[in-house]
Amino acid sequence: MDFELTPPNGLTGFPLGAPAQDVKSAAAALGRVTVRNEGSASQFGYMTVTALHPQFEIVCHLEDGRTLTAAEVWIPRPGPEEITVRFRGLDVFRTPARALVEQLTASGLTVTQDEPNHWIVPDLSLGFGRVAGHDVPLDTDGRPLYFQSALTGPADYYA
């Protein structure tokens, strides 16, 4: 199963701007679905749809309560399926995080670290996180060796 991050358009199967029902259907095609704050556009509790595949999760943010505004995919866990998440041909979750940042920068993109565990490509509204809630291989800086999540949003998401 292959996914491509295509900012500012979304993630394979989850185009930004998709109506909530389409997001729920796409999530259901991958596994179990959870919906929080159905229809809510509250700043403190907007709607999310989570696709829970046995090996990974995709969290869909519907900040207006009606349409997909950002899609966040979490690192696949080992299992029977081969799951790959790419951005412009780069394997987001199998390339060490610092090496991925170097490759993105070498390709001409601006990558900034806006928090200790979070990097963004502001011109593309693409974000990467190195926060893990379980044991993972660590890099020499003490953080997870691989990015644990990737988010794509609309053009002004990180503005």
Image (spheres, rainbow, N blue to C red):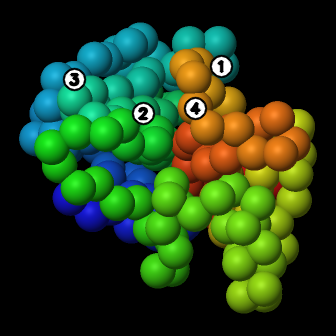
Residue found at the very far bottom of the displayed protein? 107
For mark 1, what is the residue? 43
Whether 107 is drawn above or below 116: the answer is: below
Q: Position of residue 112 (x, y in %)?
A: 87, 59
Q: Is residue 155 left or right of residue 159?
A: left
Q: Which residue is pictured at 44% across the width and 22% down the height? A: 47
Q: Position of residue 147 (x, y in %)?
A: 62, 47
Closer to viewer: mark 1 or mark 4: 4
Q: Which mark is residue 33?
A: 3
Pointer 1: residues within 10 angstroms few (<14), some, or many (20+)? few
Quadrant for the N terminus in the image: bottom left
Q: Which secondary structure lies at badge 2? A: strand
Q: Earlier in the sequence, mark 2 or mark 3?
A: 3
Q: Is residue 104 left or right of residue 48?
A: right
State the residue in front, 127 or 69: 127
Q: Amino acid at mark 3?
A: Val
Q: Amino acid at mark 4?
A: Val
For mark 4, what is the residue? 136
Q: Which residue is pictured at 51% across the width and 80% down the height? A: 88
- Is there CB contact under 8 Å for labels 2 and 4? no
Q: Earlier in the sequence, mark 1 or mark 4?
A: 1
Q: Is residue 60 visible?
A: no
Q: Which secondary structure lies at badge 4? A: loop
Q: Amino acid at mark 1?
A: Gln
Q: Amino acid at mark 2?
A: Val
Q: Position of residue 138 (x, y in %)?
A: 70, 38
Disc 2/disc 1 C-alpha distance (Å)? 17 Å
Disc 3/disc 4 C-alpha distance (Å)? 25 Å
Q: Which mark is residue 59?
A: 2
Disc 2/disc 4 C-alpha distance (Å)? 21 Å
